[in-house]
Structure formats: structure tokens, C-alpha cells
Image (cartoon, rainbow, N blue to C red):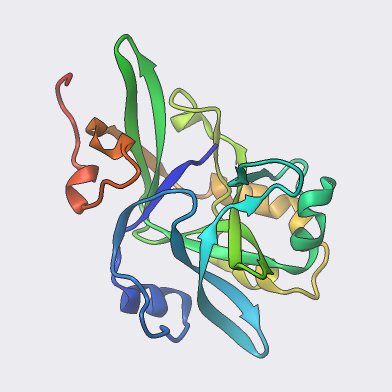
Amino acid sequence: MCGRFAIGADPEEIGFRFDVQVPELTPAPRWNIAPTDSAPIILNEGDGRRMLSAKWGFPFPSRKGLAINARVESVTSKWMFRSAAMWNRCLIPATGWYEWTQSGDGKDPHHINATERIIALAGLWESDEQGRRFTIITRPAIESIADIHNRMPLVIAESEWDSWLNPNDSTAATQSELMDSSQSFTFSSRRVGREVNRATAEGVHLQQRLDSPE
């Protein structure tokens, strides 16, 4: 799963990368975005892309908790995601994400990023009386990072952005090309300090490589 991510870029840099106008009050760089936090998403509205803010996590209708991830293998068949997968697809700007490995005295976080500074995670969005929400689509991890976690976000190549965002392209959510998109990236990982385990921790120092055991 993907339970934390970062967008370590200024709003203007995000706007330039995705060719969108930056709305007022867009938050500054965030280094430890957790479920229920707000983050920018990119969606197709009218004649072009638009950047909006949304909270991370789809609420389950019959129990407590949030669906923060949706598996690409089943996103079009599960009733909870089926409609959004057809009509409400979005991109989630990110500069990396975190996964954890278990050690003898706790969980060790790892920051994972691509060679590209800003990447686009595949997502779905929905709106209700409490506002706009999003979830991140995941896929099986590629070999280079599978030793950390067996899942990873579905990262979409720029050549596929328009197809993914187009609500009139109802086949985009099942195109095998989208799975192949993640294969075109080179990812690297580094172990970082356990401060990131705390959801309220924030700051660029969270991504500093940890070279020795804590």
C-alpha cells in the first residue's frame, strides 16, 4: 500500500509541470502527507486540466476507516471505485512516497523516488457533503523496490496523462499501457529516520538518508 507521500515542490513548480493554474492558498511543499490530509490533485474539467485540493481517503459507507488505496487489478470491478474509475480519474503530484520494513525494535521508513523530480500518481476522486476526496491507485511493486514492499503507487508517464484524465475515455482505467507506465521510470530508495512514522512530523529533513541504525 501507499500510506504516506511527499510533494517537495513549490506550488508554482507543480503548476508548470502539469500546465495548470495554481489556485490561491495552495499549500507550500509537504514532506509527510498522511491520510485525511489535504493535497493538490489534477483533474480534467471543461477544456483543460485544473488543480484542486482534496482530502486523502474515501470513507467506507458501512464501517469506520478510509480507503486510501485502490488496487489497479480490481479498481473497475469493485463497486466502491467503479464509478470513479470510469469518470473521476485524477493525477496526484508527488516527489516520492514512504514504505516501511520491520526490524527487531520497530518499523523503519524508506523514502522512494523516481529520477524525475515531480511524478504523477494515478488517483480517483469523489465529492460529498464534506468536500472533495481522493484515493491512490496501487500496482505490484517493480523489482528494484519490491524488497521494501510488494505494492507501489501506479505512476503514470506524461504521455498517458491526457488519456487517464479524459472522462470520455472509459477504457483508460483498464489499459495495459498504464501498468507499463511505471516500468518506464527508474526508482531509488533510502532508509530515513523514524520521525516520519509520526503523521504530524513535517520538514525536508524527514527525507535525509539514515546511514546508521537508530
Label count reads: 0
Q: Is residue 167 left or right of residue 44?
A: right
Q: Quadrant of residue 129?
A: bottom right
Q: Quadrant of residue 134?
A: bottom right
Image coordinates of residue 178 in percent, x first then y, are 66, 54
Residue in view at x 61 percent, y 86 percent:
48
Residue in view at x 30 percent, y 66 percent:
9
Which sits in the foreground, 186 or 78?
Answer: 78
Which sits in the foreground, 90 or 68?
Answer: 68
Which sits in the foreground, 15 or 134?
Answer: 134
Residue in view at x 52 percent, y 49 percent:
184
Q: Is residue 59 left or right of residue 171?
A: left
The quarter of the image holding the C terminus is top left
Image coordinates of residue 109 in percent, x first then y, are 33, 31
Image coordinates of residue 116 in percent, x first then y, are 37, 57
**Does residue 76 appear in the picture of this structure?**
no
The quarter of the image holding the N terminus is top right
**Does residue 110 appear in the picture of this structure?**
yes
- The relative height of residue 93 versus residue 19 in the rendered view (above or below) is above
Q: Is residue 137 left or right of residue 112?
A: right
Image coordinates of residue 39 in percent, x first then y, are 45, 64
- The relative height of residue 66 versus residue 104 in the rendered view (above or below) is below
Q: Is residue 208 left or right of residue 8?
A: left
